[in-house]
Image (cartoon, rainbow, N blue to C red):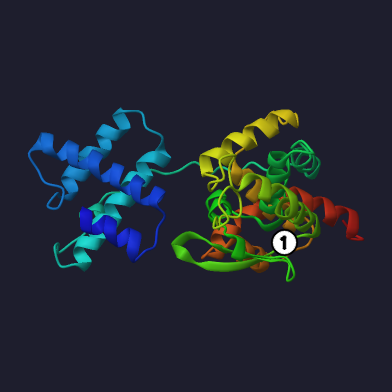
Amino acid sequence: MGAFLAYLGVERALSRHTVAAYRRDLEDFAAYLRVRGEQLESAGSEAIAAYLVVLTGRKLAPSTIARRVAALRAFYRFLLKEGARRENPALEVGRPALPYRLPRVLSVEEVDRLLAAPPAGTARGCRDRAMLELMYASGLRVSELVQLNLGDLDLEEQVVRCWGKGARERIVPVGSRALAALEAYLGWARPRLVRERRQEALFVNARGGRLTRQGFWKLLRGYARRAGIRQRITPHTLRHSFATHLLENGADLRSVQEMLGHADIATTQIYTHLTKGFIDDVYRRSHPRA
């Protein structure tokens, strides 16, 4: 298992959170196999099928079971590639069908309230406004946001460089309002938060260290409550809203795919379902025979 996890981290360049998830999934299956007197590396499709029955009995969500199957397929595919197996037993086991769920998005008015929620006049509020503005302006993932360094932001060119899944680099535009918030943060707030001049992180916490994903989640929940947003939102909600609002205002799907950093345009196409009502309304108001 160790060689596989190292492969995910080094060759596949997956995040440590993703590698940790693979580890947990494989360790759970290995614990189940020990009860059966079997080993992880030599398990067959029958053992995997029986394990899925156990997972179903635990009343796990279909998405969780599907992720476990994906982890097993990747592990045995690695063993096959390394010559340690002649077949991938997980391919013989089907994954549970996942319910089709559209991502939640905020309205433009809700986004405006959320971005205005951080208090003015404080270093933390200035930082938080800059983070929220940048996430919505550029469609960043929360992991991409907290990994940003000072050198990744180019205020003159009005772009930010980030590293997405699989260590794929992309350059994304930054809007004028986000630029203004970032300039205020860099010029006034960040110097008041940073304690070491060598700190490279763009966004820092109250102790002067790099802000974490968990820290941003906590801040976002608080500002959503302050903005009167009742639905449960996550950092990804801003990303979904970014893509949906772009498409509603005429952006083409391929450009949105590039800005989101999706490897497959099929992943981006989910947003066309979100904008269908908007497109229908435009058609009925615009076509002479509608």
Residue 102 appears in view = no
The residue shown at (64%, 37%) is 220
- Tag 1, which secondary structure? loop
Residue 29 appears in view = yes
Extreme residue toward the left, this view:
37
Q: Answer above or below: position of 88 versus 231.
A: below
Locate residue 151, reporting x and y percent: 60, 65
Callout 1 crowding tier (Cα within 10 Å): few <14, some 14–19, many ≥20: many
Of residues 17 and 202, the one drawn nearer to the viewer in this rendering? 202
Q: How many marks?
A: 1
Locate residue 100, reporting x and y percent: 53, 44
The amino acid sitting under disc 1 is Val
Residue 38 is left or right of residue 214, and the answer is left
Extreme residue toward the right, this view:
288
Q: Which residue is mark 1?
A: 174
Residue 286 is left or right of residue 85, and the answer is right
Locate residue 84, reporting x and y percent: 13, 63
Of residues 176 and 89, the one drawn nearer to the viewer in this rendering? 176
Locate residue 22, reporting x and y percent: 32, 48
Which quarter shows the C terminus? bottom right
The residue shown at (63%, 33%) is 221
